Image (cartoon, rainbow, N blue to C red):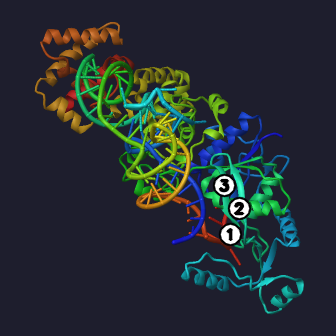
Amino acid sequence: MTVRTRFAPSPTGFLHIGGVRTALFNWLFARQSGGQFVLRIDDTDQQRNVQQALRPILDGFQWLGIDWDEGPSLDGGDSEGPCGPYFQSQRSAIYQAAVERLLQAGLAYRDFAKPEEIQEEREVAQREQQPFVYSRTWAAETEEQAEEFRAAGRTSVVRLKMFREGVCEFRDAVRGEMQFDWKQEQDHVIQRADGSVLYHLASVVDDYEFKITHVIRAVEHLSNTPRQIFIARGLGYALPEFAHLPYVAEPGGSAKLSKRKLDKYLKNREFKQLFEHGDAVLQRLGRERNPETFNPVLVDFYQEVGYLPTAVLNYLLLLGWSLDDKTEVFSREAMIEAFSLARVNKSPASFDPQKLAAFQDREMRGVPAKQKVALVLPYLQEAGWVSRPPPCSTADLLSRVLAAAGDRIKVAGDILDYPEFFVQDDALCYDERAVEKRLRKPTEAARLLSALEVQLAGVEPFDAPTLDKLLHDFVAEQEIKIGQIIHALRVAVTGKPVGLGMFETLEILGRDSCLVRMQHALQLL
RNA sequence: GGCCCCGUCGUCUAGCGGUCUAGGACUCCGGCCUUUCACGCCGGCAACACGGGUUCGAGUCCCGUCGGGGUCACCA
């Protein structure tokens, strides 16, 4: 039997980081055993814009390299695969048949209660501190009864006729043997009066129809499992294996990570740093921040500011799973090879922005120079610092800047921290505080800069080693400390107090730019 | 509140009765390197929630307490 797993996003427009982790585990498990990973769209409750709401989710998966064998097409349109359609909204006939069978088997009944009647019973139970058990007062046992209710103007939903004694036992690949009392289960509604069907029914039917062998999902579904087993058994289905993953917890806390609590997380120092780093990239781009999606709880965030998908994946992999006591770097292939459900943790893991950053750092260091150029280019273009298509000089300039930058570029968008290499000399911005501190305040700065300028004009070749030597000779000659000239020089040619290595910077800018900029800086004084 | 789950450094984790005076990683704190920044290098702080058992021996097994969380829809 070939392994088949699934991820069933509901088209909300958001791809939650916890959801990605669930999808990742499903994907890994399928890939590892040469099975299939299916994407099914849970849109039983959605009405409009499914395609549009699906787009960011599919985009996210594509960006991360989590590919699906069956499911909607890349643009969120019609589904592809032998078990389709993969949109639940298009599968009503199949669900209807399942509901009929449950009804016929006496495992479900038509209930003609009004919502407020149910509500009342529920409140009574609550007041008496008892679990709510529906009286089945309005349950139609026969067609005659149903007619009576209908004649009285009532409409019906279909409810499961749950067992009221005994236990439901099943094995969970992460948690071991599970037991739930049937009597805790309510007579869940599986079909509404309008004929639309509810999640649990659809989910169980589809898992069967899609031949899903392993249901790997968030632990929130653990307590839903008995009712799903009830449905599956009632329909004569063989049960899939279950694996309930712990949820991803909020930074520094133990509650479930939620995209709606951004304001709260922003009070966490590390999380705030993560957010502001991304925000800085956006500001440099001049791009409007979409408050709905620009949120580190959603993958859009990482894609937008230039994280590496492999870093995000590797970090997520280790959130609730580990191979051993030391291995933590996994390539895509290595994670597929190493993953196992048995080593998934039972307890929730909290989202740690700093650890994510560490993975991103490490991953970024491993990116080959050429690829890094490609990573960074779109940001420069969007900022308007490089034209489209890029002039042929760009690749060379970029690889030199990138080489000099080393690991200062943490995410692709960080390239925007170095406008000095991309703007025209006369368009360079000077940091006012830096000018004050390094040029105006030290009385000798202007004199030293002028003297150095003369030497720079004549030095050959204009490259980092030569400039390094020149500057050190200059320092000896002037009997100053190197700090007295180098900071002033940096501000003069880059406009900023911090930057890449001084000599590499000079070399990349080239003699002409350096001299023009020094001139300009001297005029500021 | 009912039911269920979880509980090792701040965080992610290793640990499946003795090799644990508890290991690794991130963070943090010192120091080195250094023209800034970012790296790098060296060193350091830091945990078995608590209480009872079982056992020659418990982080590891059992029970209880406490703590945290999930779930209780005509949402998914």
In-front residue for pair A411/A290? A411
Q: Do labels 1 and 2 touch, CB within 8 Å?
A: yes
Question: How far apart are the two marked residues, 1 and 3, measured between alpha carbons?
Answer: 15 Å
Residue at position x 19%, y 11% in the image? A474
Image x and y of residue A384, in percent:
47, 38
Image x and y of residue A407, in percent:
42, 26
Q: Nearer the viewer, mark 3 or mark 2?
A: 3
Subunit ID for the residue under disc 3: A
Q: Is residue A163 left or right of residue A335?
A: right
3 or 2: tag closer to the N-terminus: 3
The circle drawn on residue A178 is: 3
Q: Secondary structure at mark 1?
A: loop
Q: Is residue A377 visible?
A: yes
1 or 2: tag closer to the N-terminus: 1
- The residue at the far top in this view is A460
Q: Is residue A47 visible?
A: no
Q: Is residue A170 above or below residue A388?
A: below
Position of the C terminus of chain A, as image quadrant, is: top left
Residue carrying label 2: A226
Residue carrying label 1: A185
In-front residue for pair A485/A63? A63
Where residue A42 sits, quadrant-wise, is bottom right
- The residue at the far bottom in this view is A152
Q: Do labels 3 and 2 touch, CB within 8 Å?
A: no
In-front residue for pair A177/A387? A177
- Residue type pointed to by label 2: Pro
Whether callout 3 and callout 2 share a subunit is answered: yes
- Residue type pointed to by label 1: Glu
